[in-house]
């Protein structure tokens, strides 16, 4: 079988990737920008690892939503699309069109929007292939379709980026050989996990990659998707078990958490980590766990690293809810006394164990309603 990538002996391979940036398919919107910035988050990835680029737009004036007359929280996929062209030394160009994650407002003024582009595969052909399938040097630049950014932005136009791709390790080679399905790499880049139901064979290959190549980036990406899928399955089975007064599928939860924690090892630029942090925090509030400190730790990371994200916006409120629960859960008070081996400074109210369960359910409902409210108010 032909390998998905090949190693070559030449020292430098000239490959140019041109990211053609369209803002509402119109150069007039680009003229609203003060500058565009591109920053490499990993300057020397290995073959089989994604390249992460932070893309930042700095506008001349605040971006206001026409619907609410408020500052836009993000610039969505309807505003920006990025056609990718790969041009190698032989002159061959391969087109790949993608929709990048929304650029989020990061300055509360509607002037600066930032987001990460994760480049791994080319989906233009029937079988997905790596964008960086050979070691060597790559030059990355962006430009507007109708006008050169240098003409519009002058010195504030983004400078080309240089990437030196290193040879794959044996683990990366093995991981890529396991992902032999035509669309395995495409699924790997998904933020959703429903495809596992229609492609169980992909789920098995992803599990094999995690088991055999656990320290590779590809394995951590696979683990994140598996963990979210299994956690969703657990939630559905748990609700059904509650209705039928049956035992909860705790073994499935443990399995999901193992994969989620492996997925959490991904770099912070992978926004899939935001969902993982929420799921792990939610899990620690369940009646048979109630690990408030760990849940609080997950929420604090969620708030610090993804303050503008779907769940991150509500994390601070969630932390306050945790503190309330800790103060009103007698079981936690007793356990905290054992941990500290000293009396607590505050006499906590004595309450029935059922109260803690109500508080936990209240937290989950509060957090999900808060998140839904944020979704409706964004854009």
Image (cartoon, grey):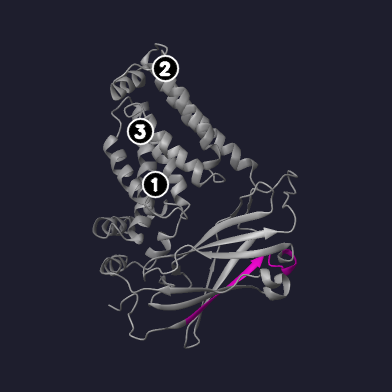
Find numbered disc 2 in the image and state the secondary structure of the residue it sits on. Answer: helix
Q: Which residue is nearer to you in this view: 74 or 269? A: 269
Where does residue 138 sit, x and y in percent of width and height? 47, 77
Task: Tell me the residue at 64%/58% (across/down).
Answer: 78
Find numbered disc 1 in the image and state the secondary structure of the residue it sits on. Answer: helix
User: In this rendering, is residue 195 above or below 156?
Assistant: above
**Residue under label 2:** 355
**Residue under label 3:** 238
Q: Main secondary structure of the magenta part?
A: strand
Q: Residues within 10 Å of mark 3 (few under 14, many from 20)?
A: some
**Residue under label 1:** 228
Dividing the picture into quarters, in which one does residue 352 lie? top left
Which of pointers 1 and 2 indicates the residue nearer the eye?
A: 2
Q: CA distance from mark 3 to mark 2?
A: 20 Å
Q: In this orientation, does residue 284 appear?
A: no
Q: Which residues are magenta?
A: 15-29
Q: CA distance from mark 1 to mark 2?
A: 29 Å
């Amino acid at each position: 079988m032909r390998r998905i990538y090949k190693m070559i002996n030449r020292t430098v391979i000239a490959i140019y990737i041109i990211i053609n940036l369209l803002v509402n398919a119109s150069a007039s919107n680009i003229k609203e920008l003060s500058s565009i910035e591109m920053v490499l988050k990993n300057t020397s990835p290995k073959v089989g690892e994604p390249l992460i680029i932070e893309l930042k737009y700095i506008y001349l004036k605040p971006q206001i939503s026409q619907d609410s007359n408020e500052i836009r929280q993000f610039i969505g996929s309807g505003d920006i699309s990025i056609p990718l062209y790969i041009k190698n030394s032989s002159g061959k160009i391969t087109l790949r069109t993608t929709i990048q994650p929304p650029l989020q407002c990061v300055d509360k003024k509607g002037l600066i929007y930032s987001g990460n582009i994760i480049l791994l595969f080319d989906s233009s052909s029937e079988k997905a292939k790596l964008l960086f399938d050979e070691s060597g040097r790559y030059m990355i630049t962006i430009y507007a379709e109708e006008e050169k950014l240098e003409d519009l932005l002058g010195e504030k136009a983004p400078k080309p980026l240089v990437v030196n791709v290193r040879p794959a390790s044996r683990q990366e080679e093995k991981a890529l050989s396991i992902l032999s399905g035509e669309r395995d790499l495409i699924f790997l880049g998904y933020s959703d996990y429903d495809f596992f139901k229609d492609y169980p064979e992909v789920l098995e290959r992803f599990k094999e990659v995690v088991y055999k190549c656990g320290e590779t980036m590809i394995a951590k990406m696979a683990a994140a998707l598996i963990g979210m899928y299994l956690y969703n399955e657990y939630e559905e089975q748990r609700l059904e078990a509650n209705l039928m007064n049956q035992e909860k599928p705790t073994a499935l939860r443990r399995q999901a958490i193992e994969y989620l924690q492996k997925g959490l090892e991904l770099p912070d630029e992978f926004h899939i980590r935001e969902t993982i942090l929420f799921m792990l925090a939610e899990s620690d509030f369940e009646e048979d766990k109630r690990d408030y400190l760990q849940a609080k730790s997950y929420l604090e990371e969620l708030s610090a690293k993804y303050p503008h994200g779907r769940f991150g916006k509500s994390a601070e409120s969630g932390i306050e809810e945790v503190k309330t629960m800790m103060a009103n859960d007698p079981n936690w008070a007793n356990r905290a006394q054992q941990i500290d081996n000293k009396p607590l400074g505050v006499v906590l109210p004595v309450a029935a164990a059922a109260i803690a369960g109500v508080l936990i359910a209240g937290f989950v409902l509060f957090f999900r309603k808060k998140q839904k409210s944020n979704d409706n108010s964004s854009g």
